[in-house]
């Protein structure tokens, strides 16, 4: 059984590994500041206790006031999983740092988030639309797409 | 004899420029409408850029407009060769989100359906892979012949063959009819022979071995870093199967092994799937023996209103880890429904696997990842 | 030369010369030529239609389906229906195509198959002309088809077509070498280059005296006619349809005609050279024959065609480098070995009597089996054990790795 790590426990570890990185934590996961996303991910990936070597999925949710980008991380070695979240503000050009340097698996998924939700990833080598065509108006998964 | 000295010196290097070839969107071996922009030097591939989205139907957006039960029909159309697995992944996520219990018989039926679906999907894979290797449709039609039996079983279960919509949050739509079980027994008795036949076509065919051994080796570390999942990851030597590592429904009680490849080449990717089909047969046989009586579905309301929150449910689909990430704001439809599709993410390593090989290998390597465009583009 | 021997051409010419007044005998030549051309072009078309039907039905049975069975009795009129459809289809020419080359390519492809029909003996005294360099003519004229392939690929201005054409030329040129070499043994044994003479020279079918030559010729001929497993020129799963990707309608039909025509004609050459042509293999010549010799020829050609269809239904395609390696590393040395052995034998036993013949058969069979097994051991892949590639891991569920 994959063990879901308690967000509280993860938050405590992160506060030690990257001080000031945790914004909040709830039952669903740990929310980190967008500036400290990369150090946090690196700390999680490199630490022997967490060893989150497998990036399961990158998701984004439009909460209207802010965008939340959700990282499902998994450790094949320890068989445990955790959820990391980062928030991007502003509807014009929200962005979060790219984690492609840590997990190549983020490549296509970050492009998908950019395409459908309009959250850009700084440092992504090829930030282009992927499912819709170049010049597609807007980002379809946003709650206000086509006035929705 | 002409005097060779009189001829002008040939240029030290012949002028040659790489050719750009668009494989697809209409191409016989791209498993749907997929386009590969390939830069080639002669027949050798120098660079590859996958371009997709031709089949994008906005499933995630559509799910936000439908009730939780209605979304099941959308999931059929993701990986249309494995509708049962898609159903299962989605209903697991909903059950996790809304805290719905499933009766035992329902779970067993879901396991039987999902494993039959896995066999069907792997049969298609083997058939198409050999077709791409140039075996003129014969293995493909052999695979389809046996898949037909599985589709007949699905027809008995739910009346549909491809887009089954069999599962519901809280169980399955209906119990299996009485004549389903003898038909299943006959299928279980016949299938090992068919699989032997297919394995003979793959593992013992000199040309298949010569074409696939050592082709496009994907190392375990690379596969993990690229978030590959499913048979591709296991062929690279990582024993990771969600049915074992994070068992859902009644997989925890099932006796089966995980086939793991030694080299991570195309040959292993072919073979791992055949072995998996055999293990699936074991699971179906065991489930058929142990299945208890009782209801198949919890009485959940048609309009499920899960509490505010989020849940991630995943299954080991034939192509890899298929996950649904659902966010609820308390309404009757999901606030956000994210599909973690294995086909899409397994394409991450495509470029690394292709560069340096020939065009003839391209279709074989691409086929060995086993993507389904319905799932890639969603 | 064209009037030599007891050929169809001479007999028909003789008939017309008798009718025509003196001084107009040249008209007899022309009329005879036109009649024969008409008969043979149509015969090839009908046979191609038959082979297409046969292939689709046989492939259907191999693939556990029915094949065409709707048009006419047992679907036998399916090729006619296909032909009608092809004629009424639009003839699309790509805008960037080299129009002249594009249009000429199908004709260049179909001419060799037709020209080769002139030298094949279809039965006792049934041949257009007894060309004294028949075998050379047959080999030379088949190489023209590689020109047709390149014209089609180049003229289409399509990258798949160009790729197919490049592959085609490389492969066809390579396979001509072992093909020709494998025939030299037959020439030594038969002592003639004429295809008519080769049949008469076969007291027993040359496949028994030349098993290795037969094998090499069969494989090389399969490659020459672009059939599976050497169908890289039009590999449908890789380069769509290869050199004829851009062709449609009648032009595509002509390509099909050329392809299947080449298949029939190559099978006919194979039968003539190695399977004792039109001779009855069970009743020696001079004895009373039940079946006409033409029927024997047809039966043997049908057998070879069935073998080719069987191969297509079962064997996957090789990659271009593997195909080239196979031609130069395996077939070429095998053909040379066959030539050396045959030359020594012909030198030692120039006119073998019956028992000497059978001793030679035994020796050649042993050489063939030894060579194939030896090459297989030297170059072949070691038997792969699937369990060495895939291991079954038994994990206990619930247990963390």
Image (cartoon, coloured by chain):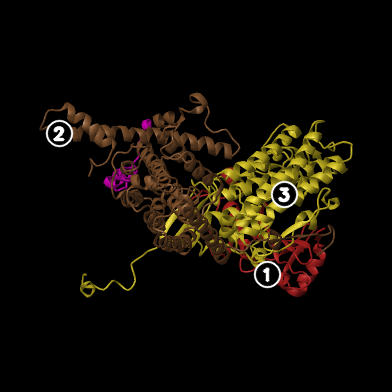
> Which label belongs to residue A36?
1
Q: Nearer the viewer, mark 1 or mark 3?
A: 3
Of A102 and C169, the residue lying toward us: C169
**How far across and how far down the image is residue B364, in percent?**
56, 55
| Residue under label 3 | B277
| Residue at 67% in and 63% down | B236
Q: Tell me: B288 left or right of B143.
A: right
Instruction: Quadrant for the C terminus of chain A, please.
Output: top right
**How far across and how far down the image is residue A20, in percent?**
73, 71
Of A84 and C385, the residue lying toward us: C385
Chain B drawing hue: yellow
Chain C drawing hue: brown
Span highlighted in magenta in the image: C87-113
> Which label belongs to residue C25?
2
- Distance, label 1 to label 2, CA atoms, is 101 Å
Tell me the element at label 1.
loop
């Amino acid at each position: 059984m994959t063990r879901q790590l308690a967000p509280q426990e993860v938050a405590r570890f992160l506060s030690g590994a990257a001080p000031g990185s945790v914004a909040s934590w709830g039952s669903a996961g740990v929310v980190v500041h967008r500036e400290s996303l990369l150090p946090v991910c690196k700390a999680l990936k490199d630490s022997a206790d967490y060893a989150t070597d497998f990036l399961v999925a990158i998701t984004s949710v439009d909460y209207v006031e802010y965008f939340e980008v959700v990282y499902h991380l998994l450790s094949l070695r320890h068989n445990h999983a955790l959820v990391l979240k980062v928030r991007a503000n502003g509807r014009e050009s929200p962005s979060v740092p790219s984690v492609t340097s840590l997990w190549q698996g983020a490549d296509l998924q970050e492009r998908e988030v950019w395409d459908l939700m309009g959250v850009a990833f700084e440092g992504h080598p090829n930030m282009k639309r992927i499912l819709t065509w170049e010049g597609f108006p807007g980002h379809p998964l946003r709650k206000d797409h086509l006035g929705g | 004899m002409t005097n060779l000295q009189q001829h002008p010196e040939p240029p030290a290097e012949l002028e040659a420029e790489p050719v750009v070839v668009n494989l697809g969107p209409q191409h016989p071996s791209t498993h749907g409408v997929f386009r590969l922009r390939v830069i080639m030097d002669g027949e050798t591939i120098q660079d590859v850029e996958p371009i997709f989205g031709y089949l994008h139907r906005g499933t995630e957006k559509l799910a936000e407009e439908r009730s939780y039960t209605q979304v099941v029909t959308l999931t059929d159309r993701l990986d249309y060769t494995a509708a049962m697995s898609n159903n299962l992944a989605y209903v697991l996520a909903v059950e996790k989100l809304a805290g719905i219990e499933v009766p035992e018989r329902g779970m067993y039926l879901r396991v039987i359906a999902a494993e039959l679906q896995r066999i069907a999907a792997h049969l298609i894979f083997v058939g198409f892979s050999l077709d791409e290797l140039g075996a003129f449709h014969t293995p493909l039609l052999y695979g389809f012949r046996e898949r037909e039996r599985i589709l007949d079983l699905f027809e008995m279960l739910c009346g549909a063959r491809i887009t089954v919509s069999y599962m519901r949050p809280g169980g399955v739509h209906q119990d299996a009819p009485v004549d389903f079980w003898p038909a299943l027994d006959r299928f279980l008795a016949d299938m090992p022979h068919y699989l032997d036949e297919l394995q003979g076509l793959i593992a013992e065919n000199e040309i298949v071995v010569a074409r696939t051994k050592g082709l496009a080796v994907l190392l375990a570390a690379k596969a993990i870093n690229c978030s590959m999942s499913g048979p591709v990851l296991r062929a690279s030597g990582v024993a990771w199967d969600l049915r074992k590592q994070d068992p859902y429904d009644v997989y925890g009680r099932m006796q089966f092994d995980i086939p793991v490849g030694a080299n991570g080449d195309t040959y292993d990717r072919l073979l791992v799937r055949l072995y998996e089909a055999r293990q699936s047969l074991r699971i179906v046989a065991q489930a058929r023996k142990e299945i208890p009586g009782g209801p198949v579905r919890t009485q959940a309301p048609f309009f499920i209103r899960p509490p505010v929150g989020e849940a991630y449910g995943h299954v080991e689909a034939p192509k890899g880890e298929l996950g649904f990430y659902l966010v609820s704001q308390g309404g009757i439809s999901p606030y956000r429904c994210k599909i973690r599709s294995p086909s899409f993410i397994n394409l991450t390593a495509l470029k690394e696997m292709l560069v340096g090989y020939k065009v003839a290998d391209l279709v074989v390597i691409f086929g060995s990842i086993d993507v389904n465009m319905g799932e890639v583009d969603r | 030369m064209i009037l030599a021997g007891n050929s169809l051409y001479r007999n028909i010419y003789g008939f017309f010369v008798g009718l025509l007044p003196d001084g107009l005998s040249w008209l007899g030549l022309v009329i005879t030529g036109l009649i024969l051309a008409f008969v043979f072009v149509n015969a090839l078309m009908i046979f191609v239609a038959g082979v297409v039907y046969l292939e689709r039905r046989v492939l259907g049975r191999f693939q556990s389906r029915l094949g065409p069975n709707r048009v006419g009795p047992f679907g036998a009129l399916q090729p006619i229906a296909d032909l009608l459809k092809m004629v009424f289809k639009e003839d699309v020419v790509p805008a960037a195509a080299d129009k002249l080359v594009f249009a000429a390519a199908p004709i260049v492809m179909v001419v060799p198959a037709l020209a080769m029909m002139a030298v094949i003996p279809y039965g006792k005294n049934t041949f257009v002309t007894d060309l004294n360099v028949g075998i050379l003519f047959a080999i030379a004229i088949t190489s023209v088809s590689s020109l047709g392939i390149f014209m089609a690929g180049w003229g289409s201005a399509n990258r798949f077509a160009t790729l197919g054409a490049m592959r085609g030329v490389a492969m066809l040129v390579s396979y001509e070498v072992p093909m020709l070499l494998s025939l030299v043994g037959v020439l030594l044994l038969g002592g003639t280059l004429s295809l008519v003479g080769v049949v008469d020279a076969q007291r027993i079918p040359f496949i028994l005296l030349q098993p290795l030559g037969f094998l090499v010729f069969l494989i090389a001929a399969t490659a020459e006619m672009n059939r599976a497993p050497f169908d890289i020129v039009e590999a449908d799963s890789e380069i769509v349809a290869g050199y004829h990707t851009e062709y449609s309608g009648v032009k595509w039909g002509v390509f099909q005609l050329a392809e299947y025509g080449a298949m029939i004609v190559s099978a006919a050459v194979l039968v003539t050279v190695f399977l004792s042509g039109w001779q009855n293999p069970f009743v020696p010549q001079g004895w009373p024959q039940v079946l006409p010799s033409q029927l024997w020829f047809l039966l043997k050609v049908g057998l070879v065609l069935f073998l080719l269809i069987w191969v297509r239904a079962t064997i996957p395609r090789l990659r271009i480098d593997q195909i080239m390696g196979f031609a130069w590393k395996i077939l070429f040395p095998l053909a040379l070995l066959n030539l050396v052995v045959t030359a020594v034998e012909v030198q030692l036993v120039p006119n073998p009597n019956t028992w000497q013949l059978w001793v030679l058969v035994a020796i050649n069979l042993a050489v063939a089996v030894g060579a194939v097994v030896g090459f297989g051991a030297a170059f072949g892949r070691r038997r792969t054990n699937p369990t060495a590639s895939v291991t079954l891991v038994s994990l206990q569920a619930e247990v963390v790795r």
